[in-house]
Amino acid sequence: MNLKLYHFMPDKLNLYGDIGNVISLKKRCEWRGINLEIENITNTTGIKLSDCDMFFIGGGSDREQAIATEQFSKIKNEFKSAIDNGAPALTICGGYQFLGEYYKTADGEKLAGLNILDFYTESINSKPRLIGNILVESDKFGDIVGFENHGGRTYHNYETLGNVIIGYGNNDDDKKEGLLYNNLIGTYLHGPILPKNPKIADYLIKAALENKYGSVDFSNINDDIEFTANKYMADKLRATLK
Ligand code: GLN
C-alpha cells in the first residue's frame, strides 16, 4: 500500500521538533509495510490536494507565519473541501491557527486564516506566552503529553482533544486542548507530539488508508518504548499536582 503526505512549508513552520511528526508517520507506515511518500510543499502554486492522502503543517514564529499566509491563501478552497471530505491532517500551533478566521499577533497584525473552521486566535501583548510541558486527558487517545509555547489564545466550540490537566492548551481560560473535526487534528503540542503519543499517529494513518483503500486490516505494532515515554512524562506531570 502507498500513501502520500504533503508537508507544508517545512522550511518555515518547524518549531520544537515538529519534523519528528513526519518521521514518526513515515516509520510507523514502514513498520507496517506501507510506503509513505513525503512531498515538501514550499510553493502551493499548481499543486493538487487530491493527489495526496494526508497533510501536515507545523508551527512557526509570528514572522514566519506571516510569510506562509500567502501560500496558504492560494489553496484555501481546495484545502477546505479536502478536510470536509475527511482527509486526515495534523496541524501544530501556528499551523493550527491557520485553520481559523484569523490570528492576531502580539504586534496587533491580523493574519488571515484559511477560514476552514469557525474560530479565531489572538495574542494579547499584556499577557504572557503560554509555555511549558502539558498533559491532556483525552477520551479518544488516553494521556497526551507534549510541550507548548504560544502567545495565541484560540477559542472555539468544536470537539477538542481533551481536558488540560497541566499546562494551558487552547487558551488560558477553558482548560481544553486542540480541536478534532472530521479527521483534522489541531493542537498546540510540539515536542514533537506523535512519537510519544502513537495513538494519534495511528489514527491519522488509519484514516488515510480507509479513505484510499476502504476497510483495512490495520495491525498493531509494539509500542512499549513509546508508551513508556508517554507514561514517564504523564506520571512526572501528575506528581506536580500533589
Ligand atoms: N506564533 C504563534 C504564537 O505565538 C505560534 C507559535 C508556535 O507555533 N509555537 O501563538
Image (spheres, helix red, strand yellow):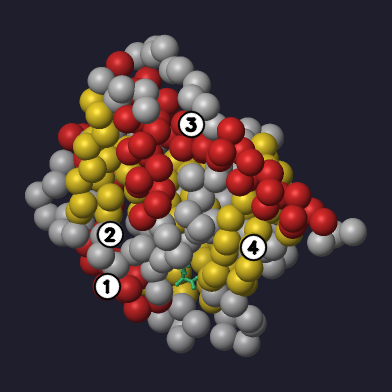
Structural crowding at the residue carrying mark 3, measured as other residues with C-alpha within 10 Å and reported as few (<14), some (14–19) or many (≥20): some
Q: Mark 4 CB in 8 Å range of ligand 1? A: no
Q: Which residue is mark 1?
A: 67
Say if residue 202 shows up in the picture. Answer: yes
The amino acid on which the numbered mark 2 sits, given as a three-letter code, is Pro
Q: Which residue is mark 3?
A: 203
Q: Earlier in the sequence, mark 4 or mark 2?
A: 2
Question: What element does badge 4 sit on?
Answer: strand
- On the image, the x and y values in percent for residue 26 come to 33, 38
Which numbered tag is attached to residue 133? 4
The amino acid on which the numbered mark 4 sits, given as a three-letter code, is Asn
In whole angstroms, how far apart are the C-alphas of marks 3 and 2?
22 Å
Question: Which residue corresponds to the image point at 57% horizontal and 85% vertical from the top-left?
Answer: 125
Q: Earlier in the sequence, mark 4 or mark 1?
A: 1
The amino acid on which the numbered mark 1 sits, given as a three-letter code, is Ile
Quadrant in which residue 97 is drawn:
bottom left
